[in-house]
Image (cartoon, rainbow, N blue to C red):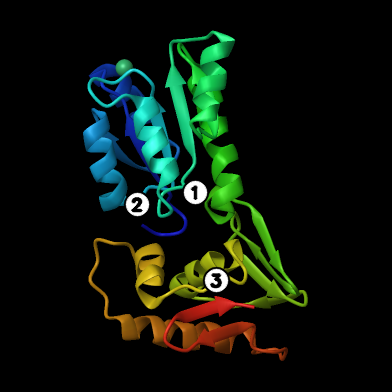
Amino acid sequence: MSTTQPTVLVVEDEPAQREVLAYNLEAEGFRVARAENGEEALILVDEEQPDIIVLDWMLPNVSGIEVCRRLKTRSETRNVPIIMLSARSEEVDRVRGLETGADDYVVKPYSLVELMARVRAQLRRTRPATVGERLEYEDIVLDAETHRVTRSDLPLKLGPTEFRLLSTFMEKPGRVWSREQLLDRVWGRDIYVDTRTVDVHIGRLRKALTLHGGDDPLRTVRGAGYALG
Ligand code: CA
């Protein structure tokens, strides 16, 4: 999905709890994928590539702990933040939850306000552009809340696609993105777009970034893709 709308995977076997959580996350502007058990969660993680997972501890068959352990041992999913939900409040369980690699831990019954704050806190770390953060790279400043971009304090005019491309790059300077990864992130996985379209928009972004002078900060990595810096 687009950079401005992160996907949250909600894994909860209680239908009423799952729906309340999903409803509130959608109201906050998130895209929500729902799983009712651990097996489904593991499949949906590959299909939906969520930005964050809210995972119930007590699930039938494959427990939340086991789902967490499996996701944190796979390199493709290791960096997806996981917030565990549990009715267990004892310190030993909390420690066990965090030991399996969960990034945060919320005890039921939880306040939705608190849970939303924790979801945002995790995304601020991993997907800062999606939660209205201000990103900086050298003399380029991107304000995700107002959608304004400046370079050396001069405003830059970017189309929506170029804005999403730049925020993707600015979240992880130096990272090399393949065209396919950029398509998934910027255009969304459900839409068919030719990979050459990426090159066209990269060209527009480069033009916009260098309009008032300054070096081209985007790097073409032959056979691999593009990177900022
Ligand atoms: Ca449960």
Report x, y in % for residue 58: 34, 17
Vertical comparison of 18 with 72: above or below: above
| Residue at mark 2 | 49
Upstream in sequence: badge 1 or badge 2:
2
Viewer-proximal residue among 83 and 123:
83
**Quadrant assignment for the N terminus:** bottom left
Q: Amino acid at mark 1?
A: Asn
| Residue at mark 1 | 79
Point 45% across, 13% down: residue: 108
| Residue at mark 3 | 166
The quadrant of the rendered image in which ligand 1 is seen is top left
Report x, y in % for residue 55: 39, 29
Point 59% across, 51% down: residue: 132
Query: In terms of image quadrants, where is residue 123?
Result: top right
- What is the crowding at mark 3: few (fewer than 14 residues within 10 Å), some, or many (at least 20)? many
Vertical comparison of 55 with 79: above or below: above
Left or right of 159 in this view: 181:
left
